[in-house]
Image: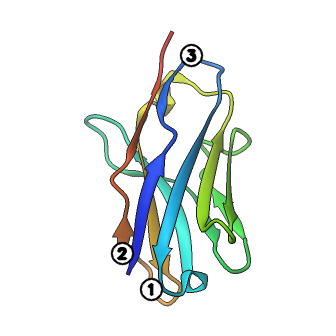
Amino acid sequence: QVQLVESGGGLVQPGGSLKLSCAASGRALSRYYMGWFRQAPGKEREFVASIGWSGGSTFHADSVKGRFTISRDTVKNTVYLQMNNLMPEDTANYYCAARPVLLNQYTDWGQGTQVTVSS
């Protein structure tokens, strides 16, 4: 089991930037993929990006490609989501999640951090 704590959300103007952090703790993080998801009011949860903890391979949703970048620091056990050129439609609660490499579903979730993009 992995414990996840997100931080870094807030209010930002369109075109601005934010960097979200997800502090991870637990056993064998190298056996997980880490992901960021988001959910806006009245909408379904949406995949944003993922990264392999061991190899660092990344995948970004088309909606954020070129604007958001996922990364991880294996010393600090932290996953990041750098968000640039933010748009109002990026407003959502952002969640960090962990998926064991042998499973096809994310099994551990953080509590979320709110990102609001508004002028």
| Residue to which mark 1 is pinned | 103
- Image point (37%, 71%), residue name: 108
Q: Which amino acid does label 2 sit on?
A: Thr
| Residue to which mark 3 is pinned | 13
- Image point (44%, 86%), residue name: 103
Q: Which of marks 1 and 3 is nearer the N terminus?
A: 3
- Image point (54%, 87%), residue name: 28
Residue 14 point in image, percent of width and height: 59, 17
Q: What residue type is labelled 3?
A: Gln
Numbered marks: total: 3
Most distant residue in the left direction? 42
In the rendered view, would you say 38 is above or below 100?
above
For residue 58, side relative to residue 7 (left or right): right
For residue 7, side relative to residue 52 (left or right): left
SS of the residue under disc 3: loop
| Residue to which mark 2 is pinned | 107
